Amino acid sequence: MQSLYSSHLDCIHIIDHIMRKIGFYFLLDSTFRKGIDIKEAKRKRTAGQNIDKSYNPNLTTIYLCCSVNSTFIKVSTGWKIKPAEWNYNSQAPLKKYPNHLELNVYLQKIKLKVERDYLILLINDVPIDASAIKEIIVGALGGGGSNSVRITFWQAFDEFLLEKGK
């Protein structure tokens, strides 16, 4: 009977970890032109209609975002892109963006590093709050202080080429 009780506690522990899963995603700032009905434009985009003329023609910042305990976290990646050159479903640059492969590799690498560091916190039962997650994101983007190594675009591109060559 005691072994059943022990396995029950393990299930609760595992469920507790699953329930604390945080989804990280990319978000653009100032996506649409002023005066555009945003709900209607999003509905058309979801339906597959071309709404390029509704988008803001200027470059806009790409953010890495998540919500932790009802606190929204939004940290700039340092990259900018025109909203018409962004795929909102896959959260990646479209092929019409001149450096779409390089930017996609960089964004995915950052997102994977943040997810890895988050999972390390989960495994080690470290209390997770908004400030801890923001610190992870800032660290992944190269702003983590002296022990953080900033990854340049070309370093990420070289790693991408090495991985593709395997």
Image (cartoon, rainbow, N blue to C red):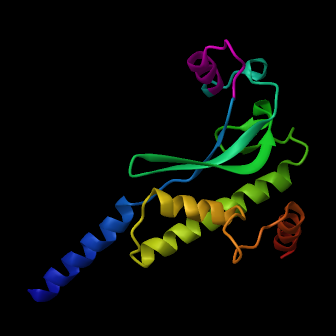
Please provide percent x and percent y for residue 99. Answer: 89, 48
Q: Residue at x 86, y 73 (%)?
A: 162
From the viewer's perspective, is 39 left or right of 157?
Answer: left
Please provide percent x and percent y for residue 140. Answer: 67, 65
Q: Which residue reaches farthest front?
A: 146
From the viewer's perspective, is 119 left or right of 154?
Answer: left
Q: Does any portion of residue 32 appear in the rendered image?
A: yes
Q: Which residue is drawn at 52% across and 50% down?
A: 66
Q: Does any portion of residue 50 appear in the rendered image?
A: no
- Examine the structure image and report whether residue 36 is included in the region drawn in magenta: yes
Please provide percent x and percent y for residue 19. Answer: 35, 59
Q: In the picture, residue 56 is in which quadrant?
A: top right
From the viewer's perspective, is 111 left or right of 95?
Answer: left
Look at the picture and state if 11 lies above or below 101. Answer: below
- Point out the image quarter for the C terminus: bottom right
Q: Which residue is drawn at 80% across and 67% down?
A: 151
Residue range in magenta is: 31-45
Q: Which residue is drawn at 40% across and 46% down?
A: 70
Please provide percent x and percent y for residue 34. Answer: 69, 16
Looking at this view, is 115 or 79 the one in front?
Answer: 79
Look at the picture and state if 6 lies above or below 127. Answer: below
Q: Which residue reaches farthest left?
A: 1
Look at the picture and state if 32 lies above or below 67. Answer: above
- Point out the image quarter for the N terminus: bottom left
Looking at this view, is 114 or 73 the one in front?
Answer: 73
